[in-house]
Image (cartoon, rainbow, N blue to C red):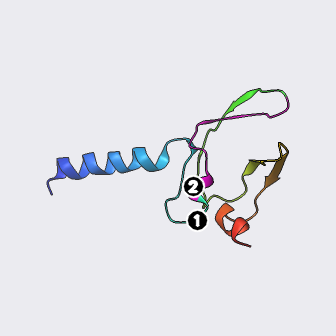
Amino acid sequence: MSDDMEEVAEHSLLGLCCCPGCMECGRCVFCPHVDLTNTSANPTDGKSYHIKQHINCCSKGIIYIVYRSCMKIYIGKTIQAMRKSWDS
């Protein structure tokens, strides 16, 4: 591969991996439950917040919201990766 092609490929991969927002890791059973978004809304007042980092199922120390079918919400924070938290 030429140097120019390698540079284009590298920038393309960086763009996919490093853009801010919530993404799927693509390697776990939790992925289908992830909302692909770059914003999150406070469920009590509707205020919207921009996600400033790239987060996915492998991210640690993230605050998350679970919307349950019974119309209740659960807000939590992970210490380990989200996919490990939900596998337990």
**Above-or-below relation of 2 to 45:** below
Hey, which quadrant is residue 51 in on the image?
Answer: top right
Label 2: which secondary element: helix
As drawn, is 29 to the left or to the right of 2?
Answer: right
Q: Is residue 34 magenta?
A: yes
Q: Which kind of residue does numbered mark 2 sit on?
A: Pro
Instruction: Report which residue position mark 2 lands on.
Output: 32
**Above-or-below relation of 32 to 42:** below
Q: Which kind of residue does numbered mark 1 sit on?
A: Val
Neighbourhood count class around disc 1 (C-alpha, 10 Å): few under 14, some 14–19, many 20 upward: few
Is the Cβ of the residue at disc 2 closer than 8 Å to that at disc 1? yes
Label 1: which secondary element: loop
Neighbourhood count class around disc 2 (C-alpha, 10 Å): few under 14, some 14–19, many 20 upward: few
Count of residue discs: 2
Closer-to-camera residue (86/72): 72
Magenta range is 31-44
Closer-to-camera residue (33/77): 33
| Residue in the image at 58% along x and 65% along y | 29
Instruction: Report which residue position mark 1 lands on.
Output: 29
Q: Position of residue 22 (x, y in %)?
A: 59, 45
Q: Position of residue 63 (x, y in %)?
A: 75, 49
Q: Position of residue 39 (x, y in %)?
A: 64, 34
Hey, which quadrant is residue 49 in on the image?
Answer: top right
| Residue in the image at 79% along x and 54% along y | 77
Alpha carbon separation for disc pair 2 and 1: 7 Å
As drawn, is 56 to the left or to the right of 14?
Answer: right
Q: Is residue 32 magenta?
A: yes
